[in-house]
Each structure stands twice: as structure tokens, then as C-alpha cells.
Amino acid sequence: MLSQKLQQKLLQRLSPQQILLMKLLQIPSIALEQRIKQEIEENPALEDASDPELSSDQEEFTETEVDPVAELEKERDDFDITDYLDDDDIPAYRLNSGNTSPDEERREIPYASGASFHEVLISQLGLRVLDERQQKIATYIIGNIDESGYLNRDLSAMVDDLAFTQNIITDIKEIERLLKIVQEFDPAGVGARDLRECLLIQLRRKEQNPAVELATELVDNFFDELSKKHYDKITKKTKATDEELRDAINEVLKLNPKPGNSLDEGSRSSQYIMPDFFIYNRGDELELQLNSRNMPELRLSRGYTDMLETYSETKTKSNSQKEAVQFIRQKIDSAKWFIDAIKQRQHTLFVTMKAIMDYQREYFLTGDETKLRPMILKDIAEKVGLDISTISRVANSKYVQTPFGTFLLKSFFSESMQTDSGEEVSTREIKKILSDCIAAEDKAKPLTDEQLTDILKEKGYNIARRTVAKYREQLNVPVARLRKEL
């Protein structure tokens, strides 16, 4: 039996405007420009005030110049194909194959092109005397080499693939013979199946001398001990002196562990960092600027506001006119929301970064990481009166350019730790001291985690060894044994 009851609920929902603002807060300046361009393309009621194509004549629209009903129909993607076939106004020369006028300005866009890593290998394969069958197998081998230059495919699996996909019956021995040919290609080390083989290929192609010969022996017979820096075991087995071992290790360090990375540079896009904020030191006074360099000035389309005003004054409206008015109103409201959201985004970014700059004033004045104060999202949220989630969105993927470099904003946030004197310090300060200690250590006898812990305790930082190990790993510093040098 159905039962009816009256229930009262209190729900909190984000409005579309709030959702739009949250999304805009997350994206950095380099992506904001593209987002604004996308909005301008999608919303005809929004336009770029700095667009030189928008002249005063274009800004003034009348009811006869722009038909809102036609705009509505265009929004629905209904169009007459004959509109696109009307060529009465097209010059005759444009319908020919050489469709340019003699006096027309020619603008050509140059394109940067270069051979990819695999294309370089294929071109070298063409210089070898191989029959058609061998060419196909060698080409298949090259196709299985990754961008780092390694062949990570098992040879037995390649035998099966060639049989099923190309109807080529072969065996592991034949593939190995052709692989040896590929391994002779440039860059040296390409086609190796692991790091050890990659280094051996490069060493055997170098001009031979005692250091290279010993390096070849180390990689070939003592690769595990070499990678773990067990130099005592190596000297006992090879009878080599410390100087000879040092020269051999230097030869190994000159090799390229990823030979494929030396090519294909043209296909790799360089990543540039565009700062969202600029901080300048003006005579011990900090100045903050928001990066608005590529952000266009937005405004409502005069044509759409005039159309809305005109149709609002009309007493009797047809159904199509009512739909047109509703369409225009939606577009104008959406444009207003977007403009307001952009302004609010800029204001939120500025006040948040200003609070961070004031909080870390000593650091931004000196650039000394030991001056960084412990700071969490809650500290800034309380200063600016915003929610912690909003501060998190601002700090996400944003960069600030300072006199000492460009840094990720969230890198200035760190937990606090108390010293023996009761003073609260940032974990960034402790990491800086650790980094300095490791940089100044004797590389023949690097400092262990226990020794680093003792040094920090002497400086008044009472932390556990496992915490020191965690900070060392966050600094991408290996353990003492792997930092050892001869």
C-alpha cells in the first residue's frame, strides 16, 4: 500500500554562473585565451572590443540589416544549399585552377618539417643490400622500436606476428641477424633490447683505448655491480686501480641511455610556461601584476542589444518573433554571465596571489628558501575570505614569475614543523638544508640518512630518519650508496 508523506529538505546547489566561475578559475592564462575565443565563436552576442574588423558601421545594426528569425534558424543549422552555390559575385578567375589575380597579394604560411625518428631509420635501411623479404622483416623490426630507441618486443612474438599479418615465415635467428644490421644504424645504440645492450653497442663503436675497453668489460660482465655502485667488488674482480675505474666509468657516463631522443626533435613540441602573475621588487616594495597580456576586451554586441530593444517595443509579435526574442535574450544573458565570470576570476586571482605575496614577503624580497613560512590553503582562505576549494583552484596549474625565477604557485604551500626552540618552520626550509648538505658532502663518502638526521638535529630540527628519507625522495636524491663517486 502506497504511503504519502510531507518531507522538507535543505539542499545546496551551484548555479550555472558559479560552475562557470569554478571552471575558469582552474585554467591557467595560456588556456584562458583559447577558452574566450571559443566562447566568442559560440555566442554571437559576445564580441572582442579590440577586434579591428569591428568598425563603427558594423557595430550599428538595424532591424532590416540583421534578421533575428534568420539568426535563430542558423542556430538550428537549417540552411539552403543554394545560398552556397550562388556565384554571381565570384570573379571568373577564382573558378580556374590558377585562381589568383596577378595583382593579388600572396600570403604563404611556411611549415616546419623534418624526418621522424623511424623515417631516419627507414632511410638508412634503403642503403643496405637486402632482398624484398629481408627489407619487409627489417622494416617490421624498425616499426617495433619505441621513441627511446629500444626494441621492447619479444623476438618469438615477432615471428608469430610476421606469419599472421604479412604471411612471412621466419625464425628467431633470421630476425636476430637483421636486428644486428639495424643496430648498426645511427644513432648508436638504437635497436637494443635493454640498457646493457644499448651501452655495449655504443662502446664497441667508439675508438678503442684502455678506458673504453675496461668500460666495455664492466658493462658486459659487471653491469649489476656497476648500476649499484659496488666499486669495491669490481676492483677486486678486475684488479683495476681507482683511477682506471674512474676513467672507465666516465666513458660510460658519456653514453646516451636513450638514443632515440637524439632524433625526432622536430615532432616534439616544446613546452613553454606562461606565468599568470608577475612580482617585481621596487626598492624593497613588492609589486604584483596579473598577466592579462593576451586576454581580449569583451563586450556585448551592439546589434543584439538593439534587436532585443526593438522587438521588446513591438506590441504584437508573431510566434517566430517571440522565439527570436527568447533566443537573443538567452545569448545576451550568457554573454553577460561570461563577462562577469571573467572579471570575477581576475579579481579572485589577484587577491589570492596578493595574500600569498604578503604572507611570504621575506622570501619574495630575498629569494632565500629558508625564509619561506609554513603555509597551507586554510591560511590564505582565511585572509581573503574565500573557501579553501577556491584557493585550491587558484593555486592549481598557475605560475608566478619572480626576480628569482618562475615557480608553480602550489610549491609555496608547505606544512609546518616545530624546532627545539618551539619555532614553527616550513618543510621547504628543511628540504633546502637537506639539499645543501647533500651538495656539500664528500662524494667518496656520501651522507647516509642517519647522518643527515643527526645534522638536522644539531641544527634544532628534531625529525625522524624515515621523514628525512621521505624528504630526500621528494628532492629526487638517491640513497647514499648510489651517490658514491670514486
Image (tube, rainbow, N blue to C red):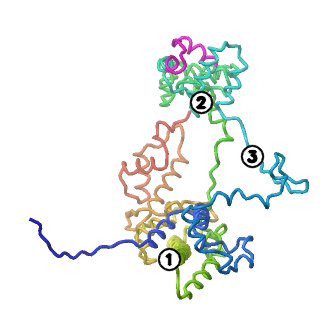
- Is 7 rendered above or below residue 178? below
Residue at mark 1 to residue at mark 3: CA–CA distance:
52 Å
Mark 1 vs 2: CB contact within 8 A: no
SS state under label 3? loop
**Residue appearing at x 44%, y 77% in the figure:** 383
- Which segment did they paint magenta? 161-181
Tell me if mark 2 has few (under 14), some (14-19) or many (20+) residues whose alpha carbon lies within 10 angstroms of its own.
many
Q: Amino acid at mark 2?
A: Gly
- Is 7 rendered above or below residue 176? below
Residue 238 screen position, x and y as percent: 53, 18
Mark 2 vs 3: CB contact within 8 A: no
Q: Is residue 173 magenta?
A: yes
Evaluate whether residue 347 shows in this view.
Answer: no
Q: Amino acid at mark 1?
A: Asn
Q: Tell me which numbered mark, 1 or 2, is placed earlier along the sequence.
A: 2
Q: Residue pushed farthest right? A: 103
Residue 480 screen position, x and y as percent: 46, 40
Q: Tell me which numbered mark, 2 or 3, is placed earlier along the sequence.
A: 3
Disc number lying in front (1 or 3): 1
Q: Is residue 400 magenta?
A: no
Residue 456 screen position, x and y as percent: 43, 54
Disc number lying in front (2 or 3): 3
Residue 243 screen position, x and y as percent: 61, 27
Q: Tell me which numbered mark, 1 or 3, is placed earlier along the sequence.
A: 3
Nearer to the camera, 408 or 392: 392
Q: Which residue is mark 3?
A: 111
User: Which quarter of the figure is the N terminus placed in?
Assistant: bottom left
Q: Which residue is mark 1?
A: 319
Tell me if mark 3 has few (under 14), some (14-19) or many (20+) residues whose alpha carbon lies within 10 angstroms of its own.
few
Residue at mark 2 to residue at mark 3: CA–CA distance:
27 Å
Q: Which residue is mark 2?
A: 149
Tell me if mark 1 has few (under 14), some (14-19) or many (20+) residues whose alpha carbon lies within 10 angstroms of its own.
few
